[in-house]
Amino acid sequence: MADKFWFNIETHEVEEGRQSDWTKLMGPYATRDEATHALEKARKRNQDWEAQDEEQS
C-alpha cells in the first residue's frame, strides 16, 4: 500500500502514490478519505478567505 494519497483534479480520482503529473494533483494526503474530500476542503478554505477579505475591506 502507498504511503500517500493524491487527488487528481482532472479525473477526480484518488491515486495511491503519485501516478500522474504533479500539475494535475492535490496532495499529498495521509488517508484516502482526506484525498477524496480535497476539493470540498479547498472550496471551504476559499470561501473562508473571501469572507475574511470582505470583513477587512
Image: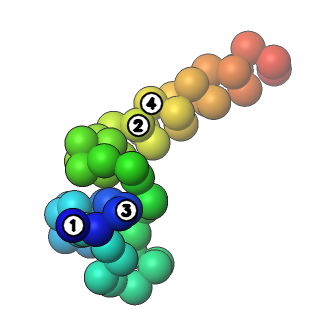
Residue where numbered disc 2 is placed: 41
- Quadrant into which the C terminus falls: top right
Specify how the rendered protein is coloured. rainbow
What's the residue type where badge 1 is placed? Met
Residue at the spot x=21%, y=67% of the render?
A: 1
Front residue of this view, candidates 10 and 5: 5
Whole-Å distance between the Cαs marked 1 and 4? 30 Å
What's the residue type where badge 3 is placed? Lys
Mark positioned earlier in the residue sequence (3 or 4):
3
Figure check: 2 above or below 27? below
Residue where numbered disc 4 is placed: 44
Front residue of this view, candidates 32 and 21: 32
Q: Disc 2 vs disc 3: Cβ atoms closer than 8 Å? A: no
Tell whether 30 sits left or right of 33.
right
Q: Which mark is residue 1?
A: 1
Can residue 6 be seen here?
Answer: no
Residue at the spot x=61%, y=21% of the render?
A: 51
What's the residue type where badge 4 is placed? Lys
| Local secondary structure at mark 1 | loop
Residue 56 in picture, x, y percent from top left:
81, 18
Whole-Å distance between the Cαs marked 2 and 3? 17 Å
Residue at the spot x=22%, y=61% of the render?
A: 14
Residue 31 in picture, x, y percent from top left:
31, 47
Whole-Å distance between the Cαs marked 3 and 4? 23 Å
Residue where numbered disc 3 is placed: 4
Q: Quadrant of residue 44?
A: top left
Mark positioned earlier in the residue sequence (1 or 2):
1
Q: Nearer the viewer, mark 1 or mark 4?
A: 1
Q: Disc 2 vs disc 4: Cβ atoms closer than 8 Å? A: yes
Whole-Å distance between the Cαs marked 2 and 4? 5 Å
Classify 10 Å Cα crowding around label 1: few (below 14), some (14-19), many (20 and above): few
Whole-Å distance between the Cαs marked 1 and 2? 24 Å
